Image: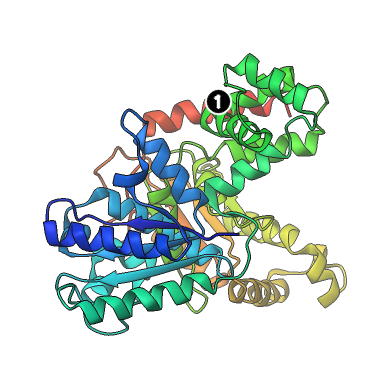
């Protein structure tokens, strides 16, 4: 299967840089790679955001051309870099990102570029390995292109994208009618054109589901020809509840998902600690792997909150705990907490993490946060500030950017609760 390559760049205003970008496109295409470049693949009149986001989700590899403009004056390159490097982190065996610094930009500048620090771009493969590419040197350009082609054409076979929205859409496809006639009936009822292949039609209906969010659950239950078990309904709702989350924000969480790091804490300007942090984390899920998010009740005392976290962790790890001790349900805190820390650390070494979401009322309780980290150092703490965009009442706690619209959060939480009644 041909590798699909997305080229991310910001070169249109500098003729020499634009020519270099087109040359990269032409060389990769000549090597039988399926290459996406906005100026060649976005047709006039097309919904270009949909085209670009679709290509970001479906590609198997990416070439990130980084000049000064890409680093300092391109919101789109910033967005593309976040999504692509998130996919590289999630899909280690089946996805590649290659960064080509040029136009005077160096590896060190990329590593120190603050907006990209959460992505650990300096750890992604860069060609050339040191310095910057001088695009007016034909031999240097030829060598870089040859290295990129060698890397991309040696990629293992893949089964399609399995991260983020693409994984969610592909998963939603499996809940649609198996028979083409039934699928077409659903599509017609939703106003989706059916003059395409079955796989494209299935993906179009699934994409409609995800774009619609939790409200799609009721519509689908009315349209589908077979009942959906309660457990599957709950799973569908969790996936659909992530549709409103900006991937630039959710991927920023990866900065706090480092195997060696402990005591990690960050803020989201959310007001719904029981809903929003889980949506952020769910959007980062990898296939069947779920990162638990423990929401804390705003009405509980400090000691009660610690007890609630311990209880939830005990339930999450009940099977391995039963292998380590008898009757873990009755174990005292000083006995079970060390074991929970060991299990949390083992999961972190496999890139699986557990989060605790604190409500706005607990945002300023430094002693509570300290007590959580002293007890379970491998937990990631999410502080919900409940503030409008542009404000951070906790300057010592990094805020996830871009910040969310709390009015949209209110609407989405209501939509989620309404759909939850159907499960």
Q: Is residue 270 visible?
A: no
Depth check: 307 or 113 in front? Answer: 113
- Residue 306's place in the image compared with 173, above or below, is below
For the point 58% across and 64% down, the residue is: 353
Depth check: 149 or 200 in front? Answer: 149
Image-quadrant location for residue 228: top right
For the point 75% across and 58% down, the residue is: 315
- Quadrant of the snapshot with the N terminus: bottom right
Q: Is residue 407 visible?
A: yes
- Quadrant of the snapshot with the C terminus: top right
Q: Position of residue 76 (x, y in %)?
A: 28, 49
Near mark 1 (Cα within 10 A), the count class, few <14, some 14-19 or many ≥20, is some
Judged from this view, the residue extending furthest toward the bottom is 130
Image side of residue 207 versus residue 142, left or right: right
Element type at mark 1: helix
Q: Position of residue 190 (x, y in %)?
A: 60, 18
For the point 87% across and 73% down, the residue is: 326
- Residue 19's place in the image compared with 75, above or below, is below
- Residue 297's place in the image compared with 311, above or below, is above
Depth check: 265 or 45 in front? Answer: 45
Q: Position of residue 246 (x, y in %)?
A: 41, 43
Image side of residue 75 versus residue 364, left or right: left
The residue at which mark 1 appears reads as 415
How many tags in the picture? 1
Depth check: 358 or 178 in front? Answer: 178
The color scheme shown is rainbow
Image side of residue 46 versus residue 297, left or right: left
């Amino acid at each position: 299967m041909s590798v699909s390559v997305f080229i991310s760049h910001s070169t249109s205003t500098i003729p020499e840089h634009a020519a270099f970008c087109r040359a990269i496109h032409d060389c990769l295409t000549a090597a039988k790679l399926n290459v996406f470049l906005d100026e060649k693949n976005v047709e006039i009149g097309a919904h270009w955001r949909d085209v670009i986001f679709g290509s970001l989700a479906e590609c198997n590899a990416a070439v990130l051309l980084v000049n000064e403009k890409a680093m300092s004056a391109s919101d789109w390159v910033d967005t593309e870099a976040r999504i692509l490097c998130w996919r590289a982190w999630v899909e280690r065996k089946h996805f590649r990102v290659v960064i080509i610094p040029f136009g005077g930009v160096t590896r060190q500048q990329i590593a120190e570029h603050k907006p990209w620090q959460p992505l650990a771009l300096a750890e992604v493969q860069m060609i050339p390995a040191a310095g910057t590419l001088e695009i007016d040197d034909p031999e240097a350009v030829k060598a870089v292109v040859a290295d990129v082609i060698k890397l991309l054409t040696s990629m293992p076979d893949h089964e399609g994208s399995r991260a983020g929205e693409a994984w969610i859409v592909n998963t939603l496809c499996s809940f649609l009618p198996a028979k083409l006639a039934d699928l077409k009936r659903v599509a017609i009822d939703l106003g989706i054109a059916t003059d395409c292949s079955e796989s494209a039609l299935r993906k179009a209906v699934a994409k409609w589901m995800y774009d619609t969010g939790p409200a799609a659950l009721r519509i689908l239950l009315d349209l589908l020809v077979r009942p959906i078990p309660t457990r599957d309904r709950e799973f569908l709702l969790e996936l659909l509840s992530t549709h409103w989350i900006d991937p630039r924000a959710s991927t920023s969480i990866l900065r706090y998902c480092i195997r060696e790091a402990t005591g990690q804490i960050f803020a989201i300007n959310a007001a719904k600690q029981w809903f929003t942090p889980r949506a952020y984390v769910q959007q980062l899920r990898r296939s069947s792997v779920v990162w638990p998010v423990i929401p804390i009740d705003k009405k509980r005392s400090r000691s009660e909150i610690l007890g609630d976290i311990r209880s939830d962790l005990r339930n999450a790890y009940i099977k391995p705990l039963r292998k380590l001790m008898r009757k873990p349900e009755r174990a005292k805190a000083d006995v079970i907490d060390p074991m929970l820390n060991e299990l949390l650390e083992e999961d972190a070494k496999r890139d699986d993490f557990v989060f605790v979401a604190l409500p706005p009322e607990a945002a300023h309780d430094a002693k509570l946060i300290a007590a959580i980290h002293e007890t379970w150092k491998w937990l990631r703490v999410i502080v919900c500030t409940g503030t409008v965009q542009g404000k951070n009442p906790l300057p010592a706690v990094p805020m996830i950017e871009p910040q969310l619209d709390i009015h949209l959060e209110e609407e989405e939480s209501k939509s989620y609760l309404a759909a939850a009644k159907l499960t």
